[in-house]
Image: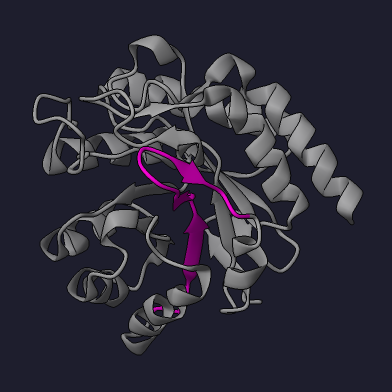
Amino acid sequence: MKTVSVGSVSFGGGAFGLIAGPCVIESRDHALKMSTAIQVIAEKVGVPVVYKSSFDKANRTSISSFRGPGLEAGLAILSDVKAETGLPVLTDIHEASQANAVAEAVDVLQIPAFLCRQTDLLVAAAKTGKTVNVKKGQFLAPWDMTNVVDKLSEFGCENILLTERGTQFGYNNLVADMRAIPLMQEHGYPVIFDATHSAQLPGGAGAQTAGMRDMIPTLAKSAVAAGCNGLFMEVHDNVEDARSDTATQWPLEKLESILFNLKAIREALK
């Protein structure tokens, strides 16, 4: 398996990393507060971290839902996070036209699950030369990601991360099939497990997505035991007032304890 390095954080080849941060950028002050706090916790536990947050949540359930600060303001905030903390940064793109501007500010371009088959979007991300993290669509089998990998590699992308985030199981429900982790690893690239989005109940609250936050530790522990190469977790310091994914962001005050538990499982596997 190829080892993919993002700044000082590596995934695959025995390395294990964390991708963490709030679902959406809420303000500059909040982003700096969260990135600093997550960095301190990750260093204490001994898990290298990539900071993540979205400048635009283009696929919110409701037209009235908060989407974020937008491209220009959001990238300025992420640039400040990178400058202040030294952490590598990840954010998602929704349109091919965003790729070059985002690539100038961040280390990893993320392709949302709903858009993982969009060829023009994948090609634009690949052409930037940045690491690309692709969320597996909730509608895809693990082996179908081979076509996604082919689209990226055809246009020169060699640093690819694949993320498992659950599979649609009837209406308003997701199931995380842990077999997807070794199956996607057969593509030759590291596989990340999204422990927070996998706990969602999409559209389950009518105008917003519901979720089962109490299931996040079980899902995360299962994924580490299954051999994932990294974890993706959305984290917030006040989950009840979060501007997005209120039901499934992980509380900042509980991040240290869950990471210590997950690290212990990974160490036991060696």
Instruction: Report whether residue 192 is seen.
Output: yes
Q: Out of 211 and 58, give the one closest to the viewer.
A: 211
Quadrant in which the C terminus is drawn: bottom right
Specify whether 14 is left or right of 183: right
Could you tell me which residue is drawn at 32 percent across and 64 percent down?
Answer: 116
At 33% from the left edge and 52% from the top edge, which residue is drawn? 106
User: Is 147 on the left-hand or right-hand side of 185?
Assistant: left
- Quadrant in the picture for the N terminus: bottom right
The quarter of the picture where residue 257 lies is top right
Kindly indicate the quadrant of the structure image that contains residue 129: bottom left
Answer with left or right where residue 23 lies relative to residue 16.
left
Residue 160 belongs to magenta span: yes
What is the x, y in percent for residue 14? 75, 63
Query: Any magenta on residue 82?
Result: no
Where does residue 263 sit, x and y in percent of width and height?
Answer: 78, 40
Rendered residue at 57%/70% (across/down): 184
Q: Which of these two is toward me, 128 or 145?
A: 145
Describe residue 100's horizontal placement relative to residue 130 as left or right. Answer: left
Is any part of residue 112 visible from this angle?
Answer: no
